[in-house]
Amino acid sequence: MIVNAETQALIAKFLDNPDDVEVSFQLAHWRSLSNENENYFQQLSEIWVMSSNGAVLDEINERKSVLELNRSLPNHANQKNIVLKWIGSIAAISLLSFVSYWALSTKSETLLTRSTHNGQTDSVFLADGSKIMLAENSTLIYPKVFNKNTRTVYLNKGKAFFLIFKDHKHPFKVIMKESSVSVLGTSFNIALSNNKIDLDVKTGVVSFLPYDKGKTSFLKADEAITYFINSNRIVTRSSLNGDAWLTKNLVFVEAPLEDVCKQLSEYYHVDIKLSGDLMHDKKLNADFKSNSLHEVLQILNVTYGFKTKKIKDIIYLKIPN
C-alpha cells in the first residue's frame, strides 16, 4: 500500500467535508482498490473521531489542515506517528467548536428527497461513495451525511439500481414500506409497486426481510425474487432483465413466449398479449440491445410467423389462419 501526499490530502478533505461529492467519489475509488487502503482509511477515520470526540469541523481551515499533513509526509516509515500528531493538532482546533458539535449531534440525520418523472432518470451520489440510479417515476429519501451505525435510505416508489460501497462496520439498508434489504457492499436492483417488490442481485450477497419478524431470504449474484405484499408470498425467478431499464438490454434464454410478452409489456409500457394457445409452448432465445418496440415485434413476426393487431391499447400477437 502506498499512501502518498495526494492521497493524504484527499482523505483530509473528505474528513473535513464529507458532503463534497467529487472528493467522496475519488476517495471511494481509492478505497475500493485494496483491503489495505480501506483498512487504512477506517483507522484514520477512527483516530480522527477519537481525537476530536467527533467535533464538527466547520471551523477548521481545510487548506491549513492539508498543508500541515503534507509537511508531515516525507518520513513515510514513521507515518502512523506523524498522522497521530497531525490529528492531534486538528483536535486542538476542534475543541473550539465543541459546543456547536454538542448541539448538532443531538439532531437526527438531515434527509433529502430525489424524485423523477415520466421519461426522466437521475443519479444520486451518497456521502459514503455509493451511487444510486433512479428510473422514471421513482422517489428516494436519503441522508445528506450518514451519522449512524447503519446507512439507511428509503425507496418510496419506483425502481432503482444500487451500487453500494463496501463497509463492514456500517451495513447499508433500503427500506420499502414494511420490507427492507440489507447489504455490506454489492450491486442490486429494486422495483417497488403497490402490490409487489422485485429484487434482482447483480453482485455480492443481499438479505431481504419482507416484514418485521418475517423470515429473511439471502440472495447471491444473479438471483432474484418477487415479494407479493398483500399475500406475504415470495417467489424466486430469473434475474435477467431486472435492470433492463438502465442497461437498455433485454435478454431472453429459453423464455416462454408468455413471459416474453409480460417483460416486453413492462419495458415498453404497453400491453402485449398472445392470441390463442398455439404458441404458449414455444421458447425464445434473443438479445435485444436498445431496440425499438417496432423492431422487436418485427423479429418475433419473422421468427414465429406472428401478425400483430392492436385493439384499443392492447397489442395482440396472433398466427394467421
Image (cartoon, rainbow, N blue to C red):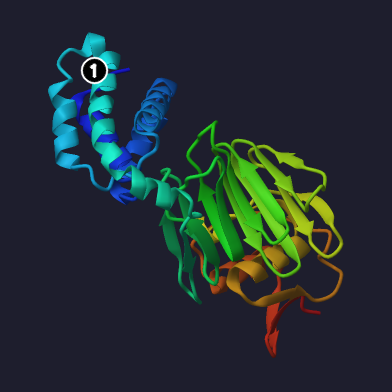
Q: Is residue 107 above or below residue 216?
A: below
Residue at the image point whose x is 48% and y is 55% from the top: 107
Q: Can residue 319 be seen in this view?
A: yes
Which quadrant of the figure contains the N terminus?
top left
The location of residue 138, given as percent across then percent down, is: 55, 68
| Image quarter (top left, top right, bottom left or bottom right) of the C terminus | bottom right
Which residue is denoted by mark 1 in the rendering? 82
- Residue at 66%, 71% (x, y): give it: 265
The x and y percentages for residue 168 are: 55, 31
Q: Foreground residue, 194 or 73?
A: 73
**Residue 242 relative to residue 11: left or right:** right
* Vertical arrangement, residue 141 with respect to residue 23, above or below: below
Evaluate whether residue 18 shows in this view: no
Q: Which of 300 and 31 is in front in this view?
A: 31
Image coordinates of residue 131 in percent, x first then y, are 45, 50
Identify the residue shown where x is 30% and y is 49%: 20
Asked which secondary structure carries label 1, the reply is: helix
